Amino acid sequence: MSNVSEDPSERASRYIATLEKALQQHSPLKESKMVEEASIMKVTDAIHRYLQDARYYIDSDKPTTSLASIAYAEGLLDALKFLKLTRTIESETQLALKSRVCFHSEDSLGGAGT
């Protein structure tokens, strides 16, 4: 048996939180050689509107409709990623963690002080 909850309200809430985090980590490109900025922004706007709809429906006790909305939003974000029309934004926390890992890796490889 799977540990994944089949409660639509719980799943929609988790899904919304996951997509919100993903949106914070991606930034649409302003343009590409093949796609105009307005087209990219139109898709980005739709993602945010579907996310807003998902929040509304979860708050309105309509979790199944919320799941459908958030699934559309995630699909559009995936499309932008697959088409390389978004870039990952690394937070200061992620960058700090990476620099610590690199520093500690150098120490364990016989770097400074050995």
Image (tube, rainbow, N blue to C red):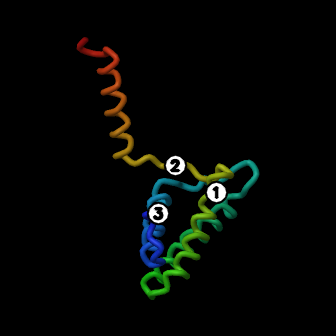
Q: Amino acid at mark 3?
A: Ser
Looking at the rendered structure, the secondary structure element under dot 1 is helix
Q: Amino acid at mark 2?
A: Thr
* First of labels 1, 2 by sequence position: 1
Of residues 11 and 93, the one nearer the viewer is 11
Estimate the spatial distance between the alpha carbons at disc 1 and disc 2, rounded to whole Å.
11 Å
* First of labels 3, 2 by sequence position: 3
* First of labels 1, 3 by sequence position: 3
Q: Nearer the viewer, mark 1 or mark 3?
A: 3
Q: Residues within 10 Å of mark 2 (few under 14, many from 20)?
A: few
Dividing the picture into quadrants, the one containing residue 46 is bottom right
Q: Position of residue 2 (x, y in %)?
A: 47, 63
Residue topped by disc 2: 88
Looking at the rendered structure, the secondary structure element under dot 2 is strand
Residue topped by disc 3: 2
Estimate the spatial distance between the alpha carbons at disc 3 and disc 2, rounded to whole Å.
31 Å
Q: Nearer the viewer, mark 3 or mark 2?
A: 3
